[in-house]
Amino acid sequence: MRRAEALGDDDSDGHVDAEHIRGGEAPGRGRGRMTLAEFRNVSFAYPAAEERRARPFALADLSFEIAPGEIVGVIGPNSSGKTTLIRLLTRVLEPASGEIRLEGVPVRRLSRTDLARRVAVVPQGILPQFPFTVGELALMGRYPHDPGRYFESPRDRSVARAAMEATGVLELADMPLEHLSGGERQRAVIARALAQEPRLLVLDEPTAHLDLRYQVEAAALLRRLNRERGTTVLLVSHDLNLAAEVCDRLVLLNGGRVAAIGGPEAVLDETLLAAVFGCAVVVDKNETTRRPVVRLTWRIDAPSAGSADRREVRETK
């Protein structure tokens, strides 16, 4: 693979039960279009040898959908199944029961290469251990489109350049990754994912280890990609306020089960969050965006996680 200077312009358990909202989409984005991704009654259990005997099922009867052009956030406590969900979607793991579909096709029927053309994952804090440049990393996203070729085509360079431009790292194309700040590295990895031209962009804790400014930049980037490019996003995050700010809908997991599905205003409910996370919170409104903001009270006097009464959370209008 040639270096980035080639990337110039080219002419060529007592869980809260929630209503399952089907087919919800981002405001103004083509209602009635087919579902892009769907989890249908998916369950998964880790082998007993893997220190999970207390929780035989990492996920149990998981069902939700993602519509084209939508940003869906998956939130929940540690060990609630968020990372397992990504591993199942990408076939790192296989469900014990149920089915995951992409554009109506079961993922188990897709080759690894075809799956990589449809889904791109931005993992937590993982970068190549070699001194690649930003441009070279972006070009790696083109591999699923012609895995037998060892040199990039003019189209590969054009797509990689557009991905770097969209994420604001084009001017860093020749910069080695180890010379970048945390926020710049994150944008470079997202550029690599966009260069795959996926139908679905999956981000696992995209603001982990970022300072406040880069957290804001990451949120702004996701909103812009969704607004300007129509990028469909599955966001997995511990950061409830990031999820509230950028997501159209939230899926709250608790103990491997869906606790609630709905808009941020519905899911980020003080009583519900206290029951799931086991600590008291206050939910206010962001004065600028009017989105929910979750604040800790620093009291661990709420009901234990998983002890909430059964209830419904409906999509807010």
Image (spheres, rainbow, N blue to C red):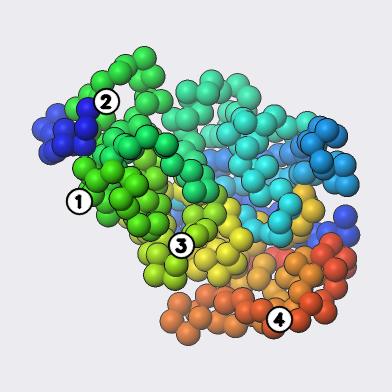
Query: Given the image, on which type of amino acid does mark 2 rest?
Result: Met
Q: Quadrant of the N terminus?
A: top left
Q: Is residue 219 left or right of residue 18?
A: left
Per the image, label 3 sits on a secondary structure element best described as loop
The percent position of residue 245, horizontal first and vertical second, equals: 50, 68
The percent position of residue 39, horizontal first and vertical second, equals: 67, 41
Query: Given the image, on which type of amino acid does mark 3 rest?
Result: Leu
Q: Quadrant of the C terminus?
A: bottom right
Q: Is residue 217 left or right of residue 71?
A: left
Crowd around label 4: few <14 · some 14–19 · many ≥20 (10 Å): few
Crowd around label 2: few <14 · some 14–19 · many ≥20 (10 Å): few
C-alpha separation, residue under disc 2 versus residue under disc 3: 30 Å
Crowd around label 3: few <14 · some 14–19 · many ≥20 (10 Å): some
Q: Which residue is mark 3?
A: 210
Whether residue 86 is visible here, answered yes or no, is yes
Query: Given the image, on which type of amino acid does mark 1 rest?
Result: Glu
Q: Which residue is mark 2?
A: 1
